[in-house]
């Protein structure tokens, strides 16, 4: 059966490739959700005029990959202790959030969040909210498949994000 998952975790460019590599992923769309105007533009979202956050909408075949697997991957891509953006992307339009479509997704996301909290990987509270899905607006065409169109820039962004997250986890481990 085909299901939908929506995750916000900073710049949507960084959120596509890790999910796309998984078997069972049908499509990933970069876009905007959680705002107060219809059909927002990138300039409106990054200008903080619309209330939206950058996110990815993932269509997946749950016979090949589970929602739980997607949530577990999501946690590895973000700093779940930072509500004011992600890594170098700062501001409300980059806030991390999990948007759920139903009670089952909510239960899975909540259980996963509690498991992450109990792991003590981070030395600060896990602050990512689990919210009801709202209207998802696809971003402009030039934002879709960014990592394929701009492989060098995408690789550089991915490496910087990984270094940042590794350093933050290391500091948390040693409480530096």
Image: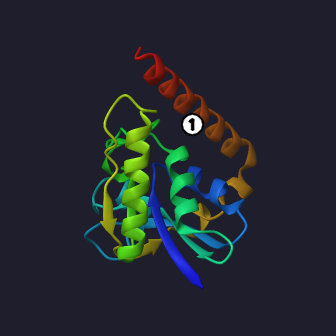
Q: Residue at x 72, y 59 (%)?
A: 21
In the image shown, does 23 or 53 lie closer to the viewer? Answer: 23
In the image shown, does 122 or 20 lie closer to the viewer? Answer: 122
72 on left or right of 97 = right
151 on left or right of 91 = right
Horizontal and vertical percent position of residue 16: 61, 58
Q: Residue at x 25, y 70 (%)?
A: 36
Residue identifier under label 1: 161
Quadrant of residue 129 in the image? bottom left
Residue 72 appears anywhere in the view: yes
Residue 63, above or below 74: below
154 on left or right of 73 = right
| SS under mark 1 | helix
Q: Residues within 10 Å of mark 1 (few under 14, many from 20)?
A: some
Residue 43 appears anywhere in the view: no
Quadrant of residue 85 in the image? top left
Horizontal and vertical percent position of residue 154: 67, 46
Residue 161, above or below 30: above
């Amino acid at each position: 059966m085909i299901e939908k998952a929506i995750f916000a975790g900073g710049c949507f460019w960084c959120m596509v490739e890790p999910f796309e590599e998984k078997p069972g992923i049908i499509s990933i769309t970069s876009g905007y959700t959680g705002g107060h105007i219809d059909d927002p533009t990138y300039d409106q979202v990054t200008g903080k005029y619309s209330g939206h956050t950058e996110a990815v909408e993932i269509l997946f075949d749950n016979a090949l990959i589970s929602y739980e697997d997607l949530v577990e991957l999501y946690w590895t891509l973000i700093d779940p202790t930072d509500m004011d953006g992600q890594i170098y992307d700062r501001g409300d339009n980059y806030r991390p959030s999990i948007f759920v479509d139903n009670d089952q997704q909510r239960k899975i996301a909540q259980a996963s969040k509690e498991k992450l909290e109990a792991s003590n990987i981070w030395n600060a509270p896990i602050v990512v909210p689990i919210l009801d899905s709202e209207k998802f607006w696809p971003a402009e065409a030039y934002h879709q498949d960014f990592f394929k169109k701009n492989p060098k820039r995408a690789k550089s962004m991915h490496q910087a994000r990984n270094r940042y997250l590794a350093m933050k986890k290391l500091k948390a481990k040693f409480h530096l």
